[in-house]
Image (cartoon, rainbow, N blue to C red):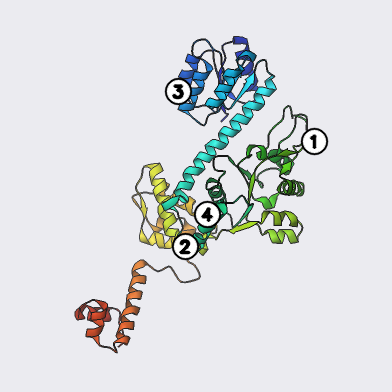
Amino acid sequence: MSDSILLVEDEKILRISLSDALRAEGFSVLAVEDGEAALTALEKGAFSLVITDIRLPGIGGTEILKKSLAEAASTPVIMMTGFGSIEDAVQAMRLGAFDYITKPFDLDELILVARKAIEVHSLTEENIRLKKELSTYYGGPNIIGESKAMQTIFALLDKISRTDSTVLILGESGTGKELIASTIHFQSGRKHKPIIRVNCAALPSDLIESELFGYEKGAFTGADARKPGRFDLADGGTLFLDEIGDLPPLTQTKILRFLEERSFERLGGTTSVSVDVRIIAATNKNLEEEVKNGSFREDLYYRLNVIPLVLPPLRKRTEDIPLLIDLFTRRFNDQLGTAVRFDAEALVSLANYSFPGNVRELLNVVERCVSLAGGKIIGKDELPDHIGGARRDKARVATLHEITAEAEKKHINTILKLTQGNRSRAAEILGISRKTLWEKINAHRLDL
């Protein structure tokens, strides 16, 4: 689905020219000629960007800006202004406009500013989504993970978030590396600036340099205007480089230079660009092994590994599985308007499964089961086949009743030994009647 732009311009020829140029770039454009039509459009639909002239008959561009901010604060607004109304444009910037452009302007200039605005809008929307997820996963009293391993991670996050140091997050796929990176960002002093995420493994090697560092006009065929890179967009905030172990050698060198000098050069450029960016990197690869076999720079590894954070796989924190199941079940019940739950046998089967895909796999399993549930109870037979019949090599997970009964048996046996078999004295210490003690001795088959 293409990004939608609301264009407000009263001059017919200019409005048609701008609409055609933006559509040629792949944007969906709704062009209107006055402020009244613009306000109606804002009430009816959502836009990725608003471009409006400041001086319009009747309702002016400033009112359109205010309406847009009230309807959708994250939608950027670009103001078009003549030379004589630059003061109005500056005032609009103070009110919250993304940028302004002075007439007459080059179409390439407008398209460049529009692309940057839409990219920022997309990142802002993604940040809002992640903040909501983080408030569920890691926010305050709703923090998920009572295991010792995760409590250690959370304690480290509080300390890491207060620094600007480079962080290297290590762990298997599906352990939550991106959420941890986002947590660090949103708990830091950079939280009001963007966090820009780049999956290094998903970008072709011949494109990753231009995506990260941007390019100058004329850098290559088709580079008709300067394009900011992810480092530009992350200025003041955080750049999260996921799967950094997949970076090609040349890009590794440029990342190293940035970490050493805090500057870079755009593709096709000759001048250094300085930005204030914190780097958080992540990988599921063993970078020490990658260094040994020559596929990853040793000096870059040490530059990244200032603060290492190793996330445990789900099989190493099985006590968190019931908490996660409850969280995910409630989430999908809320989304689907259902009220289903897993029965005890299904929960034991899930707890016994090793989850090679970690938390992400558990999330997918719960979503599938809740979505396809035939009734209000999800039984063992409704679990995926590879989970319903799965058993670990080690002993099965005991039920709460079994654990409680075993603890009670051991405690009664200990007290009886202390009292040398005096049941009246033992009952007194245990705070129960002699009859109840006798019943428990029989129930636990204690050999006295």
Q: Amino acid at mark 1?
A: Thr
Nearer to us in this view, 390 or 294: 294
Q: Is residue 429 left or right of residue 49?
A: left
Under circle 1, the secondary element is: loop
Inter-mark Cα distance, 2 to 4? 17 Å
Under circle 3, the secondary element is: helix
Q: Is residue 341 visible?
A: yes
Q: Residue at x 75, y 47 (%)?
A: 257
Q: Quadrant of residue 379?
A: bottom left
Nearer to us in this view, 165 or 220: 165
* Whole-percent x, y for residue 213 in the image: 71, 39
* Whole-percent x, y for residue 264 in the image: 74, 41
Disc 1: which residue = 270
Q: Is residue 50 visible?
A: no
Inter-mark Cα distance, 3 to 1? 47 Å
Mark with earlier residue (4, 1): 4
Disc 3: which residue = 44
How packed is label 4: few (under 14 Cα within 10 Å), some, or many (20 or more)? some
* Whole-percent x, y for residue 121 in the image: 56, 33
